Image: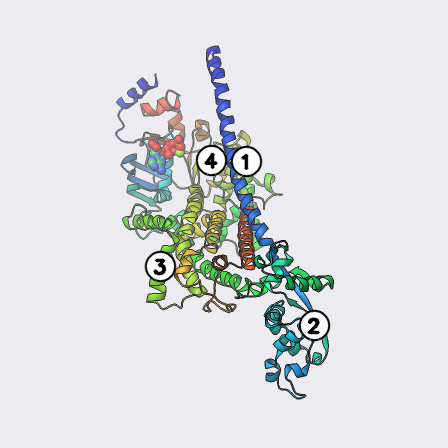
Amino acid sequence: MNKNTTEIIKLKLAKRYAKEKRFKLYGISAIAVSIAFLLSLLINISVTGLPAFQQTYINIEVDIDSKLLKLDSQYSEQELFRANYSKVVKQSLKAMFPGVKGRKQKRALRQLVSKSAIYQLRDFVIDNPSVIDTKQSLWFLARDDVDVFMKGGIDRSLPESDRRLKDFQLVWVDKLLSENRLEKRFNVSFFTEDDSREPEQAGIKGAMIGSLLTMLVTMLLSFPIGVSTAIYLEEFAPKNNKWVDLIEININNLAAVPSIVFGLLGLAVFIGLFGVPRSVPLIGGLVLTLMTLPTIIITSRAALKAVPPSIREAALALGASRVQTTFHHVVPAAMPGILTGTIIGMAQALGETAPLLMIGMVAFIADVPQGITDPSTVLPVQIYLWSDSPERAFTERTSAAIMVLLGFLIVMNFLAVIMRKKFEKKW
Amino acid sequence: MIDIEKREEFDIEIDKTVGKPFIDDAKFSTRNVDVFYDDKQAIFDANIDIGKNQIIAMIGPSGCGKSTFLRCLNRMNDTIQGCHISGDIKLDNEDIYHKHQDPVLLRARVGMVFQKPNPFPKSIYDNVAYGAKLHGLASNKIELDELVEKSLIRAGLFKEVKDSLHKPGTGLSGGQQQRLCIARTIAIDPEVILMDEPTSALDPIATAVIEELMIDLSKKYTIAIVTHSMQQAARVSQRTAYFHMGHLVEVNDTNTVFTNPEHQLTENYITGRFG
Ligand SMILES: Nc1ncnc2c1ncn2[C@@H]1O[C@H](COP(=O)(O)OP(=O)(O)OP(=O)(O)O)[C@@H](O)[C@H]1O
Ligand SMILES: [Mg+2]
């Protein structure tokens, strides 16, 4: 090389390296900022949400007296079911705190335990009728106020009027604590119960099943439709055809339509025109399919386009038909990309709230849906519903549900990575 | 310098293909074939016969249309956007562009090895077995194994890959990939094999294996090979066709082309004054 040229290059080299360094720095600081945001979000959610994974239980000596239950020596199953369990619970509590007087205090005493205690006792007695006329030491869900206290949410130093637990209630709680009758346990019912008006009883099972069913409908519809559309457009559709171009433009535009519009469309077309019931996973899945399709089609097409044409030529030259070429070689080669696109689309759908509000999936539903035509809600909508409630226990559950939702999203992304790896291994 | 030479080239008339483009026992015969990529003409009025059980070499400077012409013979050009072809191309006296002609069947009869190796992103075994499975050429696993092995041996690749048949074909070296593509093509036992610079990525030893294979195959099959190596053309082919800027300039017995070319352009090319 000419000496002069080398000098010129050398002179510029320092500048080029400086530029490279600067660019690297920008990149790293951008990543640092986003990680900081992400961390603060996660920490915030975890701090509020983690307590919801524990729940306070209260131990009571229950005197299952047949007289209190109003049961004769002979009783039918129905009588057993209808027996006065609430009285039993009330009396047992009274027996533990003999000095309680006055209506207000008596009511407060009853409210140490959750309303669900009555049903829990009923189920226990029905399952074990031999316990009638015996004393049993049973654990019940504590009321949300007690729960909040146990989790450190009530400050004793505040004046009584500013506290949710009054002085006399604190005395009871202290007594229970000293007798080891109050315990925080893992909150199983958060995962096994449906939504409820009583915060300590509210769980996310209904929403999880609802989400699952909705995702199932979305997946079953959007994957085959989206992928076959992409395959057709990419591999078979005539090029430079104005109809094909029109469809392409429309698909690209659909990807940019705000999701709530799909909700309105679903309301008008699926519910209004075809009479699909509201608030059910079926309609939710249909609407989310509309929303997910453009994502799946666009990413699948990109994946198909990335398959080198030489692969198609190789197959065609061996006498494979176009369909064989496509399905034996092109689609498998594009599969990792197609799956990634699909899972991204599904993850979007899983977290989507707005269009579901339009089709009535926002209702309070206290039953676990049994099928895709049972009313149900979904995780993000459940979060939205709970976030509206002022009770501390609901705030906790809002964050806990967000954590569960994030957990699902992470699992899905992880799955995407695994599937990519699996399909890529075939190469 | 080159510009001046090129201008000289333009002055030389390319009127009609000189030499002996037509023969009696033709496998392929093309008449008045023009090929266009959109508006750009890549082949001008190609008239040539390709003899049965012969090797024909196609030579010419880069970009003169050798690959384009070859791809007309198995209708691979059908897959290219904006490429259209006029004229007659007959295989065994049947028009291969006739509307009742099935391009899938045609391509099974006329195999092709591409200029750039293009193995499937599958195992070596599957690469070779694919065509045979597609056309049902093996009735069971043992037959298929045998066919794969035989094809790999003939392509001179078996020794190198016999312990890694189930490793990806894309993991082979460029030259190995090219031999894999050759093995894949001969596995379906085509009547005609079109080879577009099959040895351009191979070392002399592998090249010799492929050349031997071609000579061996030509006893039963018809072979058209594009090559930039005139020695190779001289070694393997019976006839040679010289292309120049889309024109088929001269076709003759290989011997004649290299010792006594008729056309000025052919002479320039083989004596190294051009290209
Ligand atoms: N797919 C295509 N679209 C448009 N033009 C093309 C296409 N393929 C080839 N051509 C053009 O056709 C002409 C002939 O190309 P071709 O590939 O047949 O040349 P070649 O003789 O095989 O060259 P080489 O020896 O470099 O392989 C070239 O001018 C090229 O630019
Ligand atoms: Mg070429």
Query: Badge 1 local density, few (<14 within 10 Å), some, or many (20+)?
Result: few
Residue A199 placement, left or right of A288? right
What type is the residue that disc 3 sits on? Leu
Labels 2 and 3: the sequence-earlier one: 2
Look at the numbered disc 3 and give the secondary structure of its residue: helix
Which mark, residue B173? 1
User: What residue is disc 3 on?
Assistant: A264
User: What residue is disc 4 on?
Assistant: B198
* Residue A71 image position (x, y, % from top left): 64, 85
Residue drawn at the location 33% of the way across and 24% of the way down: B265
Q: CA distance from mark 1 to mark 4?
A: 14 Å
* Residue B69 image position (x, y, % from top left): 35, 37
Labels 1 and 4: the sequence-earlier one: 1
- Subunit that carries the residue with mark 2: A
Look at the numbered disc 2 and give the secondary structure of its residue: loop
Q: Is residue A246 visible?
A: yes
Which mark, residue A98? 2
- Subunit that carries the residue with mark 3: A
User: Mark 1 and mark 4, same subunit?
Assistant: yes
What type is the residue that disc 2 sits on? Pro
* Residue A413 image position (x, y, % from top left): 53, 50
What type is the residue that disc 1 sits on? Ser
Mark 1 or 2: in front is 2
Mark 4 or 2: in front is 2
Look at the numbered disc 4 and give the secondary structure of its residue: loop
